[in-house]
Amino acid sequence: MSEVSQSQAHLTALRSDIGIAWFIKRTIMAVLILCVSIGGVAWLLHASIKPTLNANAAVVTSSNQALAPTGSIARH
C-alpha cells in the first residue's frame, strides 16, 4: 500500500468513529460552557450595581409621591 491510500484509510476509520455519542458529548459541553458564561456575566453585572444608587432612587421616588399622591390634583 502506498502512503496516500494508508492515510485515506485512516481518515475513513476516523470518520466512522464520530457518531451520535460524539455529537451528544460536544452538545453537552457547549451547553455547559454557555450556562457558565451567561451566569458569570450576570453575576458580574449584578455585582457592579452600586446599592447606594438604588437607595437614592427609592428616596427620590418616595419624596415625589409624598408631594403629589396618586389620584390627587395639585393646586397652587
Image: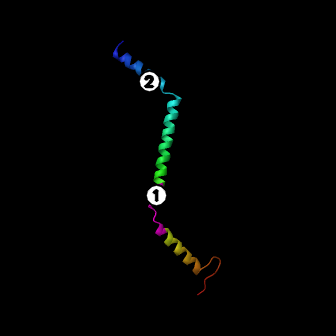
Would residue 43 be found to the left or right of residue 3 on screen? right
Three-letter amino acid code at the position of disc 2 = Leu
Q: Is residue 11 above or below residue 68?
A: above
Q: Where residue 75 sits in the image (x, y, percent)?
A: 61, 85
Q: Secondary structure at mark 2?
A: helix
Identify the image quadrant of the C terminus: bottom right
Q: Is residue 11 above or below residue 55?
A: above
Identify the image quadrant of the N terminus: top left
Q: Is residue 74 above or below residue 22?
A: below
Q: Secondary structure at mark 1?
A: helix
Q: Which mark is residue 14?
A: 2
Q: Which residues are magenta?
A: 43-53
Q: Where residue 2 sits in the image (x, y, percent)?
A: 34, 14
Q: Residue furthest right?
A: 71
Q: Where residue 73 sits in the image (x, y, percent)?
A: 63, 81
Would residue 76 be found to the left or right of residue 12 on screen? right
Question: Is residue 51 a member of the stretch shown in magenta?
Answer: yes
Q: Is residue 42 above or below residue 74?
A: above
**SS assignment for the magenta stretch, majority:** helix
Camera-nearest residue between 47 and 76 = 47
Q: How is the image coloured?
A: rainbow
Callout 2: few (<14), some (14-19), or many (20+) C-alpha neighbours within 10 Å? few
Three-letter amino acid code at the position of disc 1 = Leu
Q: CA distance from mark 1 to mark 2?
A: 44 Å
Name the residue located 50 percent from the left edge and 46 percent from the top edge: 35
The residue to which callout 1 is attached is 45
Question: Is residue 19 a member of the stretch shown in magenta?
Answer: no
Name the residue located 48 percent from the left edge and 45 percent from the top edge: 34
